[in-house]
Image: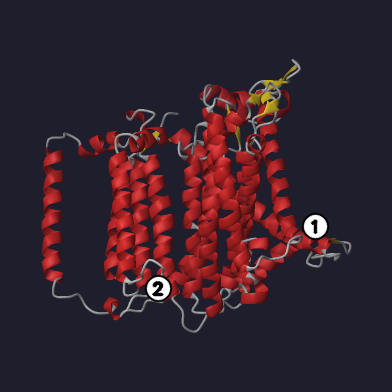
Amino acid sequence: MEANFLGINMVNFWTYFILAGGIFVFMFMMGAVMSWSERKQSAVLQDRIGANRASIPLPFGKKFAMWGFINNLADAIKCLIKEDFKPKVYDKLMYNLAIFFAFIPAVLAVAVIPFAGIVKPAEFFNVSYLKWIPYLPEYFAKNLPDYSFKVQVADLNVGLLFIFAIGGISVFGAILAGWSSNNKFSMMGALRAASQMISYEVSMGLSLLGLIFIFQTVNVWDIVQAQNELAWGWLPKWGVFMQPLAMFIFLAAAVAENKRMPFDLPEAESEIISGYFTEYSGFKMLLFMFAEFIEIVFVAIMLTTFFFGGYTVPYMAADGFYFPWGTYVHLSHATVVILQLISFHVKVFFFAWLLQQARWSLPRFRYDQLMQLGWRILLPLAIANLIITVIIVALGGL
Amino acid sequence: MDFNVLMYILSGLVAIAGGLILIIAKHPIRGAMGLLIAMLALAAMYAILQAHSIAVFQIIIYAGAIMVLIIYFIMLLDIKSDDYRRPFSKFFWLGGAFILLLTIFFVLKLYFAIAGQPDVFKAMSLSANPASSPDTFGGIELFSKGLMSRYLFAFEFVSTLLFAAIVAVISIVQLDWKGRKNE
Protein backbone atom coordinates (compact mmCIF):
# COMPACT_ATOMS: atom_id res chain seq x y z
CA MET A 1 0.00 0.00 0.00
CA GLU A 2 2.95 2.34 0.54
CA ALA A 3 3.25 2.89 -3.18
CA ASN A 4 5.17 5.96 -4.20
CA PHE A 5 4.98 7.93 -7.41
CA LEU A 6 7.41 10.85 -7.80
CA GLY A 7 7.87 10.81 -4.04
CA ILE A 8 4.13 11.15 -3.35
CA ASN A 9 2.44 8.75 -0.97
CA MET A 10 -0.43 7.30 -3.03
CA VAL A 11 -2.78 6.81 -0.06
CA ASN A 12 -2.45 10.48 0.81
CA PHE A 13 -2.78 11.39 -2.82
CA TRP A 14 -6.13 9.62 -3.25
CA THR A 15 -7.42 10.92 0.10
CA TYR A 16 -6.73 14.53 -0.78
CA PHE A 17 -7.80 14.03 -4.39
CA ILE A 18 -11.24 12.83 -3.25
CA LEU A 19 -11.40 15.49 -0.53
CA ALA A 20 -10.52 18.32 -2.91
CA GLY A 21 -12.96 16.98 -5.50
CA GLY A 22 -15.70 16.71 -2.90
CA ILE A 23 -15.18 20.27 -1.66
CA PHE A 24 -15.04 21.55 -5.24
CA VAL A 25 -18.37 19.86 -6.00
CA PHE A 26 -19.78 21.18 -2.71
CA MET A 27 -18.91 24.76 -3.66
CA PHE A 28 -20.48 24.36 -7.10
CA MET A 29 -23.64 22.81 -5.71
CA MET A 30 -23.85 25.62 -3.18
CA GLY A 31 -23.44 28.11 -6.04
CA ALA A 32 -26.37 26.46 -7.84
CA VAL A 33 -28.48 26.44 -4.67
CA MET A 34 -27.65 30.10 -4.09
CA SER A 35 -28.69 31.15 -7.60
CA TRP A 36 -31.98 29.32 -7.03
CA SER A 37 -32.60 30.72 -3.56
CA GLU A 38 -31.66 34.23 -4.69
CA ARG A 39 -34.58 34.10 -7.10
CA LYS A 40 -37.04 32.46 -4.79
CA GLN A 41 -36.09 34.62 -1.83
CA SER A 42 -36.39 37.85 -3.81
CA ALA A 43 -39.77 36.63 -5.03
CA VAL A 44 -40.98 35.91 -1.51
CA LEU A 45 -39.74 39.25 -0.22
CA GLN A 46 -41.45 41.10 -3.06
CA ASP A 47 -44.66 39.10 -2.66
CA ARG A 48 -44.28 37.19 -5.91
CA ILE A 49 -44.21 33.45 -6.58
CA GLY A 50 -40.91 33.40 -8.44
CA ALA A 51 -39.48 30.96 -10.94
CA ASN A 52 -41.70 27.89 -11.24
CA ARG A 53 -42.40 27.33 -14.96
CA ALA A 54 -39.40 25.39 -16.26
CA SER A 55 -40.04 21.70 -15.64
CA ILE A 56 -39.28 18.21 -16.83
CA PRO A 57 -42.46 16.52 -18.14
CA LEU A 58 -43.31 13.26 -16.44
CA PRO A 59 -45.87 10.62 -17.51
CA PHE A 60 -49.58 11.07 -16.58
CA GLY A 61 -49.41 14.84 -17.14
CA LYS A 62 -47.27 15.49 -14.10
CA LYS A 63 -44.43 18.00 -14.11
CA PHE A 64 -41.13 17.86 -12.26
CA ALA A 65 -40.44 21.51 -11.41
CA MET A 66 -38.74 21.17 -8.00
CA TRP A 67 -39.95 24.58 -6.81
CA GLY A 68 -38.20 26.35 -9.66
CA PHE A 69 -34.89 24.55 -9.35
CA ILE A 70 -35.19 23.28 -12.93
CA ASN A 71 -35.08 26.94 -14.00
CA ASN A 72 -31.38 26.93 -13.12
CA LEU A 73 -30.80 24.06 -15.50
CA ALA A 74 -32.75 25.83 -18.22
CA ASP A 75 -30.72 28.98 -17.63
CA ALA A 76 -27.42 27.14 -17.95
CA ILE A 77 -28.52 25.55 -21.24
CA LYS A 78 -29.83 28.88 -22.51
CA CYS A 79 -26.56 30.64 -21.67
CA LEU A 80 -24.54 27.91 -23.37
CA ILE A 81 -26.40 28.06 -26.70
CA LYS A 82 -26.79 31.84 -26.80
CA GLU A 83 -24.77 34.03 -29.12
CA ASP A 84 -21.49 34.96 -27.46
CA PHE A 85 -21.67 38.71 -28.00
CA LYS A 86 -18.37 40.59 -27.78
CA PRO A 87 -17.47 44.26 -28.12
CA LYS A 88 -16.15 45.40 -31.49
CA VAL A 89 -12.71 46.41 -30.20
CA TYR A 90 -11.45 44.69 -27.09
CA ASP A 91 -8.39 43.05 -25.58
CA LYS A 92 -9.11 39.41 -26.32
CA LEU A 93 -6.50 37.81 -24.06
CA MET A 94 -7.33 39.89 -20.97
CA TYR A 95 -11.07 39.62 -21.66
CA ASN A 96 -10.88 35.84 -21.44
CA LEU A 97 -8.29 35.77 -18.66
CA ALA A 98 -10.48 37.94 -16.41
CA ILE A 99 -13.06 35.16 -16.04
CA PHE A 100 -10.43 32.85 -14.59
CA PHE A 101 -9.17 35.54 -12.24
CA ALA A 102 -12.72 36.07 -11.00
CA PHE A 103 -13.61 32.41 -10.73
CA ILE A 104 -10.55 30.49 -9.53
CA PRO A 105 -9.83 32.47 -6.31
CA ALA A 106 -13.45 31.97 -5.26
CA VAL A 107 -13.03 28.19 -5.11
CA LEU A 108 -9.32 28.11 -4.23
CA ALA A 109 -9.41 29.61 -0.76
CA VAL A 110 -11.69 26.86 0.59
CA ALA A 111 -8.63 24.60 0.53
CA VAL A 112 -7.54 25.67 4.02
CA ILE A 113 -11.00 25.38 5.65
CA PRO A 114 -11.60 22.28 7.79
CA PHE A 115 -15.02 20.73 7.11
CA ALA A 116 -14.85 18.20 9.95
CA GLY A 117 -12.36 16.81 12.45
CA ILE A 118 -9.93 13.90 12.13
CA VAL A 119 -11.42 10.86 10.37
CA LYS A 120 -10.12 7.32 10.99
CA PRO A 121 -11.61 5.25 8.15
CA ALA A 122 -11.10 1.90 9.89
CA GLU A 123 -12.98 3.09 12.97
CA PHE A 124 -15.51 5.13 10.98
CA PHE A 125 -17.12 2.10 9.31
CA ASN A 126 -16.98 0.04 12.50
CA VAL A 127 -20.42 1.19 13.69
CA SER A 128 -23.79 -0.57 13.62
CA TYR A 129 -25.68 1.76 11.28
CA LEU A 130 -22.94 1.72 8.63
CA LYS A 131 -22.69 -2.10 8.45
CA TRP A 132 -24.68 -2.18 5.21
CA ILE A 133 -21.80 -0.61 3.25
CA PRO A 134 -20.08 -3.42 1.35
CA TYR A 135 -16.34 -3.94 0.87
CA LEU A 136 -15.05 -0.63 2.35
CA PRO A 137 -15.07 -1.62 6.08
CA GLU A 138 -13.06 -4.80 5.46
CA TYR A 139 -10.72 -2.95 3.12
CA PHE A 140 -9.82 -0.26 5.64
CA ALA A 141 -9.66 -2.66 8.59
CA LYS A 142 -7.28 -4.92 6.69
CA ASN A 143 -5.06 -2.52 4.76
CA LEU A 144 -5.08 0.77 6.66
CA PRO A 145 -5.95 0.06 10.30
CA ASP A 146 -4.16 3.15 11.69
CA TYR A 147 -4.75 5.57 8.86
CA SER A 148 -6.32 8.92 9.73
CA PHE A 149 -6.74 12.22 7.94
CA LYS A 150 -8.14 15.70 8.51
CA VAL A 151 -11.20 16.77 6.49
CA GLN A 152 -9.22 19.75 5.18
CA VAL A 153 -7.41 19.87 1.87
CA ALA A 154 -4.33 21.82 2.99
CA ASP A 155 -3.32 22.17 6.64
CA LEU A 156 -1.06 25.19 6.11
CA ASN A 157 0.55 26.81 9.12
CA VAL A 158 -0.24 30.17 7.48
CA GLY A 159 -3.81 29.23 6.55
CA LEU A 160 -5.52 32.48 7.56
CA LEU A 161 -2.98 34.52 5.59
CA PHE A 162 -3.46 32.22 2.61
CA ILE A 163 -7.14 33.21 2.52
CA PHE A 164 -6.18 36.89 2.43
CA ALA A 165 -3.57 36.24 -0.27
CA ILE A 166 -6.17 34.56 -2.48
CA GLY A 167 -8.69 37.31 -1.68
CA GLY A 168 -6.15 39.88 -2.84
CA ILE A 169 -5.79 38.16 -6.21
CA SER A 170 -9.55 38.11 -6.84
CA VAL A 171 -9.45 41.90 -7.38
CA PHE A 172 -7.75 41.29 -10.72
CA GLY A 173 -10.86 39.61 -12.12
CA ALA A 174 -12.94 42.76 -11.82
CA ILE A 175 -10.10 45.08 -12.90
CA LEU A 176 -9.16 43.11 -16.00
CA ALA A 177 -12.77 42.48 -17.03
CA GLY A 178 -13.59 46.17 -16.82
CA TRP A 179 -10.47 47.32 -18.58
CA SER A 180 -10.43 44.80 -21.44
CA SER A 181 -14.09 45.35 -22.37
CA ASN A 182 -13.36 48.78 -23.86
CA ASN A 183 -16.54 50.24 -22.40
CA LYS A 184 -16.82 53.29 -20.17
CA PHE A 185 -19.37 51.65 -17.88
CA SER A 186 -17.16 48.59 -17.46
CA MET A 187 -14.18 50.80 -16.75
CA MET A 188 -16.14 52.74 -14.13
CA GLY A 189 -17.22 49.47 -12.52
CA ALA A 190 -13.66 48.17 -12.50
CA LEU A 191 -12.32 51.34 -10.86
CA ARG A 192 -15.08 51.21 -8.26
CA ALA A 193 -14.47 47.51 -7.61
CA ALA A 194 -10.71 47.97 -7.18
CA SER A 195 -10.93 50.93 -4.82
CA GLN A 196 -13.74 49.35 -2.80
CA MET A 197 -12.02 45.99 -2.43
CA ILE A 198 -8.67 47.54 -1.47
CA SER A 199 -10.36 49.82 1.11
CA TYR A 200 -12.34 47.09 2.81
CA GLU A 201 -9.54 44.53 2.77
CA VAL A 202 -7.78 46.65 5.40
CA SER A 203 -10.59 46.55 7.97
CA MET A 204 -11.32 42.90 7.16
CA GLY A 205 -7.73 41.95 7.95
CA LEU A 206 -7.61 44.07 11.10
CA SER A 207 -10.87 42.59 12.40
CA LEU A 208 -9.40 39.07 12.26
CA LEU A 209 -6.09 40.11 13.88
CA GLY A 210 -7.81 40.16 17.30
CA LEU A 211 -8.64 36.47 16.91
CA ILE A 212 -5.02 35.74 16.05
CA PHE A 213 -3.96 37.48 19.26
CA ILE A 214 -6.43 35.50 21.37
CA PHE A 215 -5.76 32.08 19.85
CA GLN A 216 -2.02 32.75 19.26
CA THR A 217 -2.03 31.08 15.84
CA VAL A 218 -2.78 31.69 12.17
CA ASN A 219 -3.39 28.01 11.45
CA VAL A 220 -7.08 27.59 10.58
CA TRP A 221 -7.19 24.08 12.03
CA ASP A 222 -5.79 25.29 15.36
CA ILE A 223 -8.17 28.27 15.42
CA VAL A 224 -11.16 25.94 15.05
CA GLN A 225 -9.78 23.57 17.69
CA ALA A 226 -9.22 26.47 20.10
CA GLN A 227 -12.84 27.58 19.65
CA ASN A 228 -14.05 24.26 21.03
CA GLU A 229 -12.46 24.99 24.42
CA LEU A 230 -14.55 26.49 27.18
CA ALA A 231 -14.20 29.87 28.88
CA TRP A 232 -15.24 29.98 32.56
CA GLY A 233 -16.19 26.33 32.24
CA TRP A 234 -19.36 26.78 30.23
CA LEU A 235 -19.02 29.22 27.31
CA PRO A 236 -17.47 27.85 24.08
CA LYS A 237 -14.60 30.10 23.01
CA TRP A 238 -16.29 30.99 19.74
CA GLY A 239 -14.91 34.03 17.96
CA VAL A 240 -18.24 35.80 18.26
CA PHE A 241 -18.10 35.59 22.08
CA MET A 242 -14.42 36.55 22.24
CA GLN A 243 -14.62 39.33 19.62
CA PRO A 244 -18.25 40.45 19.14
CA LEU A 245 -17.34 43.81 17.60
CA ALA A 246 -14.86 42.20 15.21
CA MET A 247 -17.64 39.91 13.98
CA PHE A 248 -19.76 42.85 12.82
CA ILE A 249 -16.77 44.65 11.28
CA PHE A 250 -15.82 41.46 9.48
CA LEU A 251 -19.39 40.92 8.28
CA ALA A 252 -19.63 44.44 6.81
CA ALA A 253 -16.17 44.30 5.25
CA ALA A 254 -16.73 40.82 3.81
CA VAL A 255 -20.02 41.81 2.16
CA ALA A 256 -18.20 44.81 0.67
CA GLU A 257 -15.40 42.54 -0.59
CA ASN A 258 -18.10 40.39 -2.10
CA LYS A 259 -19.60 43.41 -3.95
CA ARG A 260 -23.05 42.46 -2.67
CA MET A 261 -26.08 44.60 -2.02
CA PRO A 262 -25.55 47.53 0.19
CA PHE A 263 -22.06 47.66 -1.36
CA ASP A 264 -22.82 46.67 -4.96
CA LEU A 265 -21.56 49.88 -6.56
CA PRO A 266 -19.19 48.08 -8.96
CA GLU A 267 -22.17 46.46 -10.68
CA ALA A 268 -24.95 48.90 -9.81
CA GLU A 269 -27.43 48.09 -12.57
CA SER A 270 -29.35 51.37 -12.25
CA GLU A 271 -26.17 53.43 -12.66
CA ILE A 272 -23.63 51.59 -14.80
CA ILE A 273 -25.63 48.74 -16.42
CA SER A 274 -23.73 45.78 -15.02
CA GLY A 275 -20.44 47.37 -14.09
CA TYR A 276 -17.29 45.50 -14.91
CA PHE A 277 -19.02 42.59 -16.64
CA THR A 278 -21.35 44.64 -18.85
CA GLU A 279 -19.72 43.36 -22.04
CA TYR A 280 -19.82 39.70 -21.09
CA SER A 281 -22.67 37.60 -22.39
CA GLY A 282 -23.87 34.03 -22.37
CA PHE A 283 -21.96 31.59 -20.26
CA LYS A 284 -19.19 34.07 -19.47
CA MET A 285 -21.68 36.35 -17.76
CA LEU A 286 -23.07 33.33 -15.95
CA LEU A 287 -19.57 32.49 -14.67
CA PHE A 288 -19.20 35.98 -13.18
CA MET A 289 -22.58 35.62 -11.45
CA PHE A 290 -21.66 32.15 -10.29
CA ALA A 291 -18.32 33.35 -8.89
CA GLU A 292 -20.25 35.94 -6.89
CA PHE A 293 -22.60 33.30 -5.47
CA ILE A 294 -19.66 31.08 -4.55
CA GLU A 295 -18.07 34.06 -2.83
CA ILE A 296 -21.21 34.53 -0.71
CA VAL A 297 -20.88 30.91 0.35
CA PHE A 298 -17.22 31.50 1.11
CA VAL A 299 -18.01 34.51 3.29
CA ALA A 300 -20.51 32.31 5.13
CA ILE A 301 -17.81 29.65 5.52
CA MET A 302 -15.35 32.20 6.89
CA LEU A 303 -17.91 33.54 9.37
CA THR A 304 -18.61 29.98 10.49
CA THR A 305 -14.95 29.02 10.76
CA PHE A 306 -13.58 32.08 12.51
CA PHE A 307 -16.51 33.33 14.59
CA PHE A 308 -18.90 30.43 15.11
CA GLY A 309 -16.67 27.51 15.96
CA GLY A 310 -16.30 26.00 12.49
CA TYR A 311 -17.30 22.37 12.38
CA THR A 312 -17.24 21.94 16.16
CA VAL A 313 -20.38 21.24 18.16
CA PRO A 314 -20.41 22.90 21.61
CA TYR A 315 -19.26 20.55 24.40
CA MET A 316 -18.49 17.74 21.93
CA ALA A 317 -15.02 16.18 21.98
CA ALA A 318 -13.68 13.35 19.80
CA ASP A 319 -15.45 10.65 21.88
CA GLY A 320 -18.73 12.24 22.94
CA PHE A 321 -20.39 15.10 24.76
CA TYR A 322 -18.85 16.53 27.96
CA PHE A 323 -21.52 18.85 29.35
CA PRO A 324 -20.47 21.54 31.84
CA TRP A 325 -22.78 20.09 34.52
CA GLY A 326 -20.78 16.88 34.46
CA THR A 327 -22.86 14.60 32.25
CA TYR A 328 -20.95 12.51 29.72
CA VAL A 329 -22.62 11.01 26.65
CA HIS A 330 -20.53 8.58 24.67
CA LEU A 331 -20.71 8.78 20.86
CA SER A 332 -19.08 6.55 18.28
CA HIS A 333 -16.45 7.97 15.94
CA ALA A 334 -18.79 7.93 12.91
CA THR A 335 -21.52 9.81 14.83
CA VAL A 336 -19.03 12.48 15.90
CA VAL A 337 -17.79 13.02 12.34
CA ILE A 338 -21.33 13.14 10.94
CA LEU A 339 -22.44 15.58 13.65
CA GLN A 340 -19.44 17.79 12.86
CA LEU A 341 -20.30 17.79 9.16
CA ILE A 342 -23.94 18.62 9.94
CA SER A 343 -22.89 21.40 12.33
CA PHE A 344 -20.65 22.96 9.68
CA HIS A 345 -23.27 22.80 6.94
CA VAL A 346 -26.11 24.12 9.11
CA LYS A 347 -24.02 27.14 10.10
CA VAL A 348 -22.89 27.79 6.52
CA PHE A 349 -26.46 27.53 5.19
CA PHE A 350 -27.70 29.89 7.88
CA PHE A 351 -25.12 32.58 7.13
CA ALA A 352 -25.54 32.20 3.39
CA TRP A 353 -29.26 32.78 3.92
CA LEU A 354 -28.55 35.80 6.14
CA LEU A 355 -26.19 37.35 3.61
CA GLN A 356 -28.74 36.88 0.85
CA GLN A 357 -31.47 38.36 2.99
CA ALA A 358 -29.38 41.55 3.31
CA ARG A 359 -29.66 42.10 -0.43
CA TRP A 360 -33.42 42.65 -0.31
CA SER A 361 -33.42 44.58 2.96
CA LEU A 362 -30.92 47.38 2.43
CA PRO A 363 -30.59 50.11 -0.22
CA ARG A 364 -27.32 50.81 -2.00
CA PHE A 365 -24.79 53.23 -0.49
CA ARG A 366 -23.65 56.37 -2.25
CA TYR A 367 -19.97 56.25 -3.22
CA ASP A 368 -18.84 58.81 -0.64
CA GLN A 369 -20.86 57.01 2.05
CA LEU A 370 -19.10 53.78 1.09
CA MET A 371 -15.65 55.30 1.52
CA GLN A 372 -16.77 57.08 4.69
CA LEU A 373 -17.92 53.80 6.21
CA GLY A 374 -14.78 51.95 5.20
CA TRP A 375 -12.12 54.42 6.27
CA ARG A 376 -13.75 56.55 8.96
CA ILE A 377 -15.94 54.06 10.80
CA LEU A 378 -14.85 50.46 10.24
CA LEU A 379 -11.09 51.07 10.23
CA PRO A 380 -10.92 53.09 13.51
CA LEU A 381 -13.33 50.62 15.12
CA ALA A 382 -11.19 47.68 14.02
CA ILE A 383 -8.03 49.37 15.34
CA ALA A 384 -9.70 50.23 18.66
CA ASN A 385 -10.94 46.65 18.96
CA LEU A 386 -7.44 45.39 18.25
CA ILE A 387 -5.81 47.68 20.85
CA ILE A 388 -8.30 46.63 23.54
CA THR A 389 -7.76 42.97 22.67
CA VAL A 390 -3.98 43.33 22.84
CA ILE A 391 -4.21 45.02 26.27
CA ILE A 392 -6.51 42.30 27.63
CA VAL A 393 -4.34 39.49 26.23
CA ALA A 394 -1.18 41.15 27.58
CA LEU A 395 -2.76 41.47 31.04
CA GLY A 396 -3.37 37.74 30.98
CA GLY A 397 -7.13 37.67 30.47
CA LEU A 398 -8.78 35.29 27.98
CA MET B 1 12.94 12.70 -9.72
CA ASP B 2 10.74 14.05 -7.00
CA PHE B 3 7.39 15.76 -7.59
CA ASN B 4 8.57 18.76 -5.55
CA VAL B 5 11.64 19.17 -7.75
CA LEU B 6 9.53 18.87 -10.88
CA MET B 7 7.14 21.57 -9.67
CA TYR B 8 10.08 23.73 -8.56
CA ILE B 9 11.66 23.62 -12.01
CA LEU B 10 8.29 24.26 -13.66
CA SER B 11 7.57 27.32 -11.53
CA GLY B 12 11.09 28.58 -12.20
CA LEU B 13 10.41 28.36 -15.94
CA VAL B 14 7.05 30.13 -15.47
CA ALA B 15 8.79 32.91 -13.51
CA ILE B 16 11.31 33.41 -16.33
CA ALA B 17 8.48 33.44 -18.88
CA GLY B 18 6.66 36.08 -16.80
CA GLY B 19 9.80 38.20 -16.71
CA LEU B 20 10.16 37.93 -20.50
CA ILE B 21 6.51 38.96 -20.98
CA LEU B 22 7.16 41.99 -18.78
CA ILE B 23 10.01 43.13 -21.06
CA ILE B 24 8.54 42.20 -24.44
CA ALA B 25 4.84 43.14 -23.95
CA LYS B 26 3.57 45.98 -26.12
CA HIS B 27 0.96 47.21 -23.69
CA PRO B 28 1.65 48.27 -20.07
CA ILE B 29 -1.21 46.12 -18.72
CA ARG B 30 0.22 43.02 -20.39
CA GLY B 31 3.63 43.88 -18.98
CA ALA B 32 2.08 44.20 -15.55
CA MET B 33 0.39 40.81 -15.98
CA GLY B 34 3.80 39.34 -16.86
CA LEU B 35 5.17 40.75 -13.62
CA LEU B 36 2.19 39.27 -11.77
CA ILE B 37 2.90 35.83 -13.26
CA ALA B 38 6.55 36.11 -12.21
CA MET B 39 5.54 37.05 -8.64
CA LEU B 40 3.04 34.20 -8.33
CA ALA B 41 5.60 31.73 -9.69
CA LEU B 42 8.16 33.01 -7.15
CA ALA B 43 5.60 32.49 -4.39
CA ALA B 44 5.08 28.94 -5.63
CA MET B 45 8.85 28.35 -5.45
CA TYR B 46 8.96 29.62 -1.85
CA ALA B 47 6.03 27.37 -0.97
CA ILE B 48 7.72 24.31 -2.50
CA LEU B 49 10.83 25.06 -0.41
CA GLN B 50 8.55 24.98 2.69
CA ALA B 51 8.89 28.72 3.34
CA HIS B 52 5.11 29.13 3.60
CA SER B 53 5.00 32.49 5.32
CA ILE B 54 7.34 34.10 2.79
CA ALA B 55 5.25 32.62 -0.03
CA VAL B 56 2.05 34.00 1.44
CA PHE B 57 3.55 37.44 2.08
CA GLN B 58 4.90 37.43 -1.46
CA ILE B 59 1.33 37.04 -2.73
CA ILE B 60 -0.32 39.41 -0.22
CA ILE B 61 2.17 42.25 -0.62
CA TYR B 62 3.38 41.98 -4.20
CA ALA B 63 0.54 40.31 -6.10
CA GLY B 64 -2.32 41.53 -3.92
CA ALA B 65 -1.26 45.08 -3.11
CA ILE B 66 1.53 46.43 -5.29
CA MET B 67 0.39 44.86 -8.56
CA VAL B 68 -3.20 45.97 -7.94
CA LEU B 69 -1.98 49.54 -7.44
CA ILE B 70 0.21 49.39 -10.57
CA ILE B 71 -2.62 48.05 -12.73
CA TYR B 72 -5.08 50.48 -11.13
CA PHE B 73 -2.95 53.45 -12.10
CA ILE B 74 -2.20 52.17 -15.59
CA MET B 75 -5.97 51.88 -16.03
CA LEU B 76 -6.85 55.17 -14.36
CA LEU B 77 -4.30 57.25 -16.29
CA ASP B 78 -4.83 55.21 -19.47
CA ILE B 79 -1.12 55.12 -20.28
CA LYS B 80 -0.55 54.60 -23.99
CA SER B 81 3.10 55.56 -24.38
CA ASP B 82 4.80 54.88 -27.70
CA ASP B 83 7.79 53.61 -25.74
CA TYR B 84 6.11 50.23 -25.54
CA ARG B 85 5.83 49.91 -29.31
CA ARG B 86 9.34 51.08 -30.16
CA PRO B 87 11.95 48.40 -30.92
CA PHE B 88 14.71 47.90 -28.40
CA SER B 89 17.11 50.78 -27.92
CA LYS B 90 20.83 50.83 -28.65
CA PHE B 91 21.53 49.61 -25.14
CA PHE B 92 19.88 46.29 -25.99
CA TRP B 93 23.13 44.56 -26.98
CA LEU B 94 24.99 45.98 -23.98
CA GLY B 95 22.27 44.83 -21.58
CA GLY B 96 21.95 41.52 -23.38
CA ALA B 97 25.67 40.86 -23.05
CA PHE B 98 25.52 41.70 -19.33
CA ILE B 99 22.58 39.31 -18.78
CA LEU B 100 24.38 36.60 -20.76
CA LEU B 101 27.47 37.00 -18.57
CA LEU B 102 25.30 36.86 -15.45
CA THR B 103 23.56 33.71 -16.69
CA ILE B 104 26.88 32.02 -17.45
CA PHE B 105 28.12 32.97 -13.97
CA PHE B 106 25.07 31.41 -12.29
CA VAL B 107 25.16 28.28 -14.45
CA LEU B 108 28.85 27.79 -13.59
CA LYS B 109 28.13 28.37 -9.90
CA LEU B 110 25.31 25.82 -10.03
CA TYR B 111 27.58 23.39 -11.89
CA PHE B 112 30.35 23.61 -9.27
CA ALA B 113 27.82 23.33 -6.47
CA ILE B 114 26.33 20.10 -7.80
CA ALA B 115 29.36 18.60 -9.53
CA GLY B 116 30.44 16.81 -6.37
CA GLN B 117 26.98 15.37 -5.60
CA PRO B 118 26.38 11.77 -6.65
CA ASP B 119 22.65 12.31 -7.36
CA VAL B 120 21.65 15.91 -8.00
CA PHE B 121 17.89 15.40 -8.03
CA LYS B 122 18.00 13.39 -4.85
CA ALA B 123 19.88 16.20 -3.09
CA MET B 124 17.37 18.73 -4.41
CA SER B 125 14.36 16.70 -3.33
CA LEU B 126 15.85 16.32 0.15
CA SER B 127 16.12 20.07 0.50
CA ALA B 128 12.49 20.49 -0.62
CA ASN B 129 11.16 17.66 1.53
CA PRO B 130 8.80 18.66 4.36
CA ALA B 131 10.11 15.81 6.54
CA SER B 132 13.73 16.93 6.37
CA SER B 133 13.07 20.44 7.73
CA PRO B 134 12.09 21.15 11.33
CA ASP B 135 8.39 21.72 12.09
CA THR B 136 8.76 25.40 12.83
CA PHE B 137 10.62 26.15 9.59
CA GLY B 138 8.74 28.51 7.30
CA GLY B 139 6.08 29.08 9.92
CA ILE B 140 4.84 32.46 11.03
CA GLU B 141 6.56 32.27 14.47
CA LEU B 142 10.15 32.11 13.20
CA PHE B 143 9.37 34.70 10.56
CA SER B 144 7.95 37.24 12.98
CA LYS B 145 10.66 36.66 15.59
CA GLY B 146 13.32 37.27 12.96
CA LEU B 147 11.57 40.33 11.61
CA MET B 148 11.03 41.87 15.05
CA SER B 149 14.50 41.20 16.47
CA ARG B 150 17.38 40.41 14.17
CA TYR B 151 16.21 42.21 11.04
CA LEU B 152 14.30 45.02 12.77
CA PHE B 153 16.84 47.70 11.89
CA ALA B 154 17.05 46.71 8.23
CA PHE B 155 13.25 46.53 8.03
CA GLU B 156 12.74 49.99 9.53
CA PHE B 157 15.60 51.40 7.48
CA VAL B 158 13.94 50.26 4.26
CA SER B 159 10.71 51.91 5.35
CA THR B 160 12.55 55.24 5.82
CA LEU B 161 13.84 54.77 2.26
CA LEU B 162 10.24 54.40 1.09
CA PHE B 163 9.38 57.60 2.96
CA ALA B 164 12.24 59.38 1.20
CA ALA B 165 10.88 58.08 -2.10
CA ILE B 166 7.44 59.55 -1.33
CA VAL B 167 9.02 62.93 -0.53
CA ALA B 168 10.99 62.71 -3.76
CA VAL B 169 7.83 62.06 -5.77
CA ILE B 170 6.10 65.05 -4.21
CA SER B 171 9.09 67.25 -4.99
CA ILE B 172 9.12 65.98 -8.56
CA VAL B 173 5.48 66.92 -9.12
CA GLN B 174 6.40 70.17 -7.37
CA LEU B 175 3.78 70.57 -4.72
CA ASP B 176 4.54 72.81 -1.79
CA TRP B 177 3.66 71.75 1.73
CA LYS B 178 0.10 73.10 1.44
CA GLY B 179 -0.55 70.99 -1.63
CA ARG B 180 -0.41 73.90 -4.10
CA LYS B 181 1.41 73.54 -7.39
CA ASN B 182 4.74 75.38 -7.46
CA GLU B 183 5.60 77.59 -10.40
What is the CA distance from the residue labelled 1 to the residue labelled 2?
A: 65 Å
- Residue designated by label 2: B180
Q: Number of labelled discs?
A: 2
Q: Residue furthest front?
A: B178
Percent of width and height locating residue B84: 29, 76
Lateral position of residue A346 relative to residue A107, left or right: right
Can you tell which mark lies on residue A66? 1
Q: Choose mark 1 or mark 2, whichever is in front.
A: 2
Q: Position of residue B118 (x, y in %)?
A: 16, 34
Q: Is residue A38 left or right of residue B155?
A: right
Residue at the far right in the pictured view:
A60
Extreme residue in the bottom direction: A88
Instruction: Please report the residue visible at 53 percent of the width from the left and 58 percent of the height from the top.
Output: A199
B117 sits to left or right of B167:
left
Residue A224 is tagged as none
Q: Measuring 69% from the left and 60% from the top, which residue is drawn there?
A: A35
Q: Quadrant of residue A44?
A: bottom right
SS under mark 2:
loop
Q: Residue at 29% of width from left, 47% of height from top?
A: B157
B3 to A225, vertically: above or below: below
Apparent side of residue A4 relative to residue A315 in the rendered image (left or right):
left
Q: Chain of mark 2?
A: B
Quadrant location of residue A365? bottom right
In the rendered image, is residue A152 in sight?
no
Q: Amino acid at mark 1?
A: Met
Q: Is residue A115 or residue A181 the one in the foreground?
A: A181
Crowding at mark 2 (Cα within 10 Å: few <14, some 14-19, many 20+): few
